[in-house]
Image: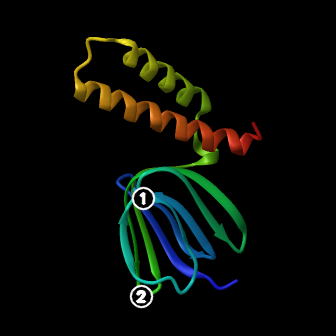
Amino acid sequence: MKSFPLKIVTPDGPQFEGEAEELIVRTISGDMGILAGHIDCVTALGMGRATVVTSEGKREAACIGGILSVLDGTVSLVPTTFEWADKIDLGRAEAAEQRARRMLEDKRLSNVEVRLAEARLKRALVRQSVASARLGR
């Protein structure tokens, strides 16, 4: 399979730089797959699983927010948060889910606080989903 240059950089630093055969990410309008020869584009990232396929195999990560760009065959993924599945602390993600659910039970929350709690819940669920798949759950 043909490959393309892929660079994944977060505010915490580089996460991946090399040749990839396929990239699948969640954008704000749904999942998007990238193969060599993809047309130039820029799109905002949503919250979901990212799959990176290289000649060495497939790796998955929780990918939340940011931008994906394809320019002249080079793919740049600049997520706000990016955690490889093998680096996710499942217990911590489960605790974050419980905290978010408890917050959402509070009927005194403002609309902004509800939206923030919902985003925290979704992030926790994405992280758990990616980590659980790695563990075969």
Q: How many marks?
A: 2
Instruction: Work out whether residue 14 or residue 135 is closer to the camera in this orientation and state it.
Output: 135
Q: x, y (%) of residue 38? A: 50, 82
The residue depicted at 59 percent of the width and 44 percent of the height is: 87
Question: In the drawing, does residue 30 fall left or right of residue 109?
Answer: right
**Residue in the image at 36% along x and 27% along y:** 117
Marker disc for residue 45: none
SS at circle 1: loop
Residue 78 is drawn in which quadrant?
bottom left
Q: Is residue 57 above or below residue 131?
A: below
Where does label 1 land, which residue? 29
Q: Position of residue 106 (x, y in %)?
A: 34, 12
- On the rendered structure, is 39 left or right of 18? left
Q: Where residue 65 sits: x, y (%)?
A: 38, 52
Judged left or right of residue 51, residue 98 is left
Circle 1 or circle 2, nearest the eye: 1
Q: Residue furthest right?
A: 136
Q: Amino acid at mark 1?
A: Ser
Q: Secondary structure at mark 2?
A: loop
Residue at figure coordinates x 50%, y 34% from the top left: 124
Position of residue 95 measured from the top left corner of the image (x, y, whole percent): 52, 22
**Which comes before the other along the chain, label 1 or label 2?**
1
Q: In the rendering, which numbered label is found on residue 72?
A: 2
Q: Is residue 45 above or below residue 121?
A: below
- Taking the spot 42% from the left edge, 52% from the top edge, the residue there is 46
Q: Circle 1: is it few (<14), some (14-19), or many (20+) Cα within 10 Å?
A: few
Q: Amino acid at mark 2?
A: Asp
Asked if marks 1 and 2 touch (Cβ < 8 Å), the reply is: no
Label 1, label 2: how many angstroms apart (C-alpha)?
A: 23 Å
